[in-house]
Amino acid sequence: MKEGILPFFKWSSNLEQKGLLKIGGSLLLRNTCLNFLGQVLPGLAGLTATPFLIRGLGLEAFGIFSLALVVLGYLGLFDLGLGAATTKYVAESMATGDRQRLTSLVWTSMAVQLSLGAVVSGESWRQVRGSISSTWSRLLQPFLRFFSLSSE
């Protein structure tokens, strides 16, 4: 294998030689099953909850709720790859046993994500706050009642 073509394999083989990387059949199977469940269960929960949400909110408010979820999904693109990078470096730190680096990575990642979230949320609220008309207010009332957020 040429140097630099697949650096992960070089990195993982170094860890295997040191006895730090131990991926057996049962661990791989367990992690695959957990990953699969992490993908399937949220979809099943959404399918199960949809009729209750439509009944509780009404069609118009459920449409607004669906649009809000779409907007949140797009805002998830703004993590700028930080989630994947954090996963990679946390896994490396755990494999090498570097707890100080692990702690630093987790706290730094959380601080950056919370800061980005606060900035995007604040700006989004600033943009939307003045443009909510009486029609939107009327459509949001069932949603607010459903989640007990209204002042009624």
Image (spheres, rainbow, N blue to C red):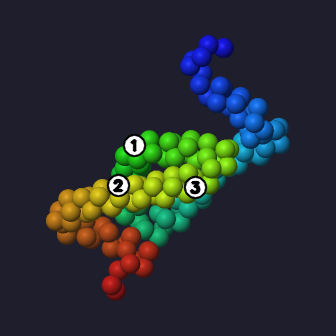
For residue 99, above or below residue 125: above
Q: Which residue is mark 1?
A: 80
Q: Residue furthest top?
A: 2
Is 63 on the left-hand or right-hand side of 44?
A: left
- Give coordinates of residue 73: x percent, y percent: 42, 49
Give the camera-side residue of 58 and 78. 78
Disc 1 is placed on an element classified as loop
Instruction: Residue at 37% x, 74% y: name it.
Output: 144
Question: Which residue type does callout 2 highlight?
Answer: Leu
- Give coordinates of residue 60: x percent, y percent: 35, 61
Give the camera-side residue of 132 and 16. 16
Instruction: Residue at 39% x, 43% y: name it.
Output: 80
Q: Which residue is mark 2?
A: 116
For residue 66, above or below residue 2: below
Residue 4: quadrant of the picture: top right
Residue 152: quadrant of the picture: bottom left
Instruction: Residue at 56% x, 61% y: name it.
Output: 49
For residue 7, above or below residue 35: above
